[in-house]
Image (spheres, rainbow, N blue to C red):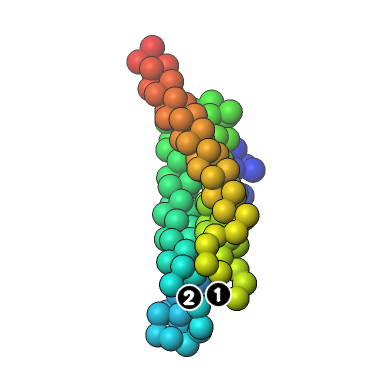
Amino acid sequence: MDPILTIVAGATILTVIGIMSGGTFLLRIATGGLPFNGLQKTFFRAGHAHAGVLVILGLVSLLLTSAVDASLPWQWASVGVLVAAILIPAGFFLSVLGRDPERPGRAIALLWVGVVVLAASLLAVGIGVIAAGVAALG
């Protein structure tokens, strides 16, 4: 694996500590310790879940493209999955900040940008893995 991608993978593992602390935040909300409305609770829960799943998907993408010896540009496509792991949760979290919002704010656009980045990145990762497999048949 490219040394920079190795560093990215290590740093990503460390972000799981932040995701874990987000779980404590959600527990405080669920037990009534923090006063948030239903929309906020739902969006905070969705943001937390997406962060965890997308970080794992990004790491799997990095490891898979490296394991099949995909060319470096295809391996770098995995970083897009990790970028989506920031954008999508940020859209959920930031769009419902404030006192008792009735609907998501403009920051919801981050979620949709993240969805596009995720789709494009997964397409590239999938093509890269397939191309490596075809090349190995050789």
Q: Are marks 2 and 1 in contact (CB under 8 Å)?
A: yes
**Is there any visible trace of residue 69 in the rendered image?**
no
Looking at the rendered structure, the secondary structure element under dot 2 is loop
Numbered tag placed on residue 100 in the rendering? 1
Mark 2–mark 1 Cα distance, whole angstroms, equals 6 Å
Q: Earlier in the sequence, mark 2 or mark 1?
A: 2
Numbered tag placed on residue 37 in the rendering? 2
**Is there any visible trace of residue 36 in the rendered image?**
yes
Numbered tag placed on residue 48 in the rendering? none
Quarter in which the N terminus is drawn: top right
> Which residue: 64% across, 43% down?
4
Instruction: Please give left or right for residue 135 compared with residue 84 in the image.
Output: left
Above or below 16: residue 118: above
> Which residue: 56% across, 65% down?
96
> Which residue: 49% across, 69% down?
40
> Mark 2 is on which residue type?
Asn
Q: Quadrant of residue 138?
A: top left
In the image, 89 versus 108, the foreground residue is: 108
Number of numbered discs overlaid on the protein picture: 2
The crowding category of the residue bearing disc 1, from other C-alpha atoms within 10 Å (few below 14, some 14 to 19, many at least 20), is: few
Instruction: Name the spot of residue 39 as percent of width and height, x first.
Output: 46, 68
Above or below 18: residue 73: above
Residue located farthest toward the top when viewing the structure as drawn: 138
Residue located farthest toward the front when viewing the structure as drawn: 102
Looking at the rendered structure, the secondary structure element under dot 1 is loop
Q: Quadrant of residue 114?
A: top right
Q: Quadrant of residue 132?
A: top left
